[in-house]
Amino acid sequence: MNTPVTLSPEQIATLTDVRHALHRRPEVSGQEVETAAHIVERLRDLDADQIWQDLGGHGVAAAFDGAAPGPTVMIRCELDGLPIPEQSDLQYRSEIADNSHTCGHDGHMSMVIGVAMALCDKRPQRGRVVVLFQPAEETGQGAPAVVADPRWVELRPDYAFAIHNLPGLALGAVQLCDGVACCASRGMQVRLTGKSSHAAAPEDGVSPAAAMATLMTSLPALSSGGALQAGFKLATLTHAQLGEATFGIAPGVGELRCTLRAVTDADMADLIERAEAEVRAIAARHSLEVNISWHDVFSATVNSAAANVEVMRATKRQSIPLRAAAGPQRFSEDFACYGLDGVETAMIFLGSGVDQPQLHNPDFDFPDTLLPVGTELFLVLINQLLGWAEDA
């Protein structure tokens, strides 16, 4: 291993300014036009050897080539914010009404910009590093679209690493999952259609009310409970709407939304089958037409053994506290897509503080003190796998 690369105080200050600028202008999934343009401008200033734009939507990637042939290491982050109004008095609070970076993607992007800054000064000894700024992670559509892009073959890595900050974990500590890192999940939208009628003569219509009432308890009852391990299943009711907000109409249409969650893709397949069977049986019992559609589909994110070994080596070299996870995170990540065709992948959880507000809370803010920690962890991983050219 060559001499580690670290960030100067001036570079850390620049990354802090970058994060604050990104924090002010959050754009939701599929709308990351301004954010992507900001990233492209910075990558051009950092002399990337190749830049790809509009990957899988508004995605951006850049390559920094090594002096000799070798593997490709990808460092990935997310471009999108959330449709959540920010509640803060920060000087750099969101300037876009109803949008915020309350998941920390502004911090993730800034760390990867930090990687590009270091690579501008010092190229890898061999292979290449690809930095990927992925769109639409929050909806699960971004990574599949990037992998489906015909240009994916140009930047497909041998190793891919990503960091997600994790509230509840000590600031600056790392948590690493053995195997599954994030649960599979998907949104189930159920539309039940009968026939409306006058509220004075409900018997002349076919209302979905009774079927909805049953499903509002029977779908969550499909949950298994217990520890986050193989066999865990969770069905969470998230939305219900029956007819229109009137007093004169007995409703003819109802809609339910439910999020299904499981540790493994196999358990998810079983949960989908059971949920669909339950909905169709209840709909038939009440003489209702039914339409089921699926949204925000995430496969289980699985860390490979080879990538985890590299992360463990890197945390030891950086003297970063490493916490073994008792199980995967309940939340989902579309980073899963990058490991489906043999790429060695690891999702790394970086503690953002025990008392930090939770992800997606309106008062969440990514801690600036994590910027050099995450950036330098990525740089050590690059050094382990590729080395640094001038130290060869």
Image (cartoon, rainbow, N blue to C red):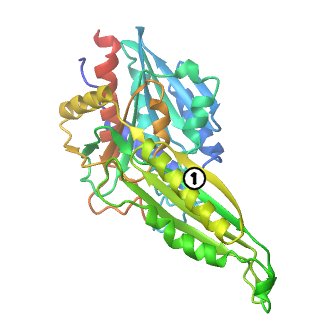
Q: Is residue 362 visible?
A: no
> Which quadrant of the rendered structure holds the N terminus?
top left
Above or below, comparing residue 278 to residue 230 in the picture:
below
State the residue at coordinates (77%, 85%).
203
* Horizontal and vertical percent position of residue 87: 48, 68
State the residue at coordinates (42%, 40%).
301
| Res 125 → quadrant | top left
State the residue at coordinates (64%, 62%).
190
State the residue at coordinates (56%, 27%).
44
Three-letter residue code for mark 1: Arg
Query: Which residue is at the far bottom?
Result: 200
Which of 381 and 305 lies nearest the eye of the viewer? 305
Which of 179 and 139 lies nearest the eye of the viewer? 179
> Which quadrant of the rendered structure holds the C terminus?
top left
Disc 1 crowd rating (10 Å Cα; few below 14, some 14-19, many 20+) is many
257 sits left or right of 223 in the view: right
| Res 7 → quadrant | top left
* Horizontal and vertical percent position of residue 380: 29, 27
* Horizontal and vertical percent position of residue 350: 31, 46
* Horizontal and vertical percent position of residue 168: 29, 58
Above or below, comparing residue 81 to residue 126 in the picture:
below
Q: Is residue 205 visible?
A: yes
Above or below, comparing residue 178 to residue 204 in the picture:
above
Q: Circle 1 is placed at which residue position? A: 25
